[in-house]
Image: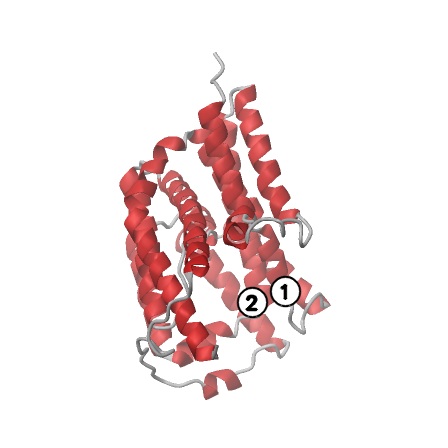
Amino acid sequence: ISKEVSLAAAMTALIIGGAVQFAWSPLIGKLHRFFPPIVTGTTIQLIGTGLMKIGINVATGLNTPAFAKPLTLGLAALMIVLILVITRFAKGFVRALSLFVTMIIGYLVSAAFGLIDLGTVARANWVTVPTPFPYGGLAWPGLIAVITVVVCFFATAVETTGHTLAVSRICGVPAEGWRIRGAVSNDGLGSAVSALFGGMALTSYSQNIGVISLTGVGSRFVVAFGGAFLILMALVPKVGAIIALMPNAVLGGVLLFMFGMVASVGVDIIGRNMTSRRDAVILAASLGVGLGIQAAPPGAFDIIPQALRILVTDGIVMGILLAMVLNLLMPKEA
């Protein structure tokens, strides 16, 4: 099978997966009734702590020439220190821009150490227009591939549900079903459109929860402006190339802090609502299974069929599902 045919099949599978997620979003939207505070807190805690491995991998420059170098570790540590200092001493508008200011300083320090290669910006095009079906149209990927992709989309839908609940909590708005339905359906529709133009599937990003929690800015107008900037990056590659110059250590240091902020939201919810041994058991079992799966050695789950392995080996999703099931099955204590 040629590379073009295989990529066309992959894009077709993503389009199908996105369409399926869009179709089942009303059902996912009804899941909010299964997320009482203890399950919501456990979910957010799992998301924050479960992503720490990604943050530290990026911060240390894993799989790059800069891996574990003193400068890499120093830059990552500097980012965390800068966020702490700015949030401690700055006020108002500057404090709201703490992450932006931190990354700008990170850029400047990286440039001073010769880590910024402007040649990539010079080589990037000024304007580009995406074309549909860049790999030659649609191609049937096979039933197993479609099932696998749909399972992946279910996993992302569960995580998106947790993200939506967390943002609702931080912004002080009711965690209503239509909010979850809208978030999940947007993920599905966006993924299908992205695959149509040869892009990858889309999902919500956990670190944005930390951004809102830290800066206190959760305005939909700010989000819309961010979306417009992403469109600009797609149409003007030179802008995207400038952003891509950010060293892993700078991004990783910020990510570590953001994931920590996500986990802190979960801790706050759990602390306010864990009132019984039953709640403690739900939390312990869910964290144990979720984080344990992520810490499992390679090959630990090879016995599981490929179509289900992606779901079962996603510690965050399995921990969330376990918390939901235990909340339904375990009787509430008087």
Looking at the rendered structure, which numbered label has been put on residue 175?
none
Mark 1 residue element? helix
Hey, what amino acid is under mark 2?
Gly
Rate crowding at label 2 as few (under 14), some (14 to 19) or many (20 or more) other CA atoms within 10 Å.
Answer: many
Residue position marked by numbered label 2 in the rendering: 106
Residue 60 versus residue 44 in the image, above or below = below
| Amino acid found under the numbered disc labelled 1 | Leu
| Mark 2, secondary structure of its residue | helix
Q: Residue at x 65, y 63 (%)?
A: 60
Residue 126's quadrant in the figure? bottom left
Q: Which mark is residue 75?
A: 1
Q: Residue 74: x, y in percent?
A: 67, 63
Look at 56% across and 35% down and name the residue there: 286
Q: Which one is in front, 319 or 151?
A: 151
Residue at (34, 42) in percent of width and height: 28
How many numbered circles are shown? 2
Residue 251 drawn above or below residue 87: below
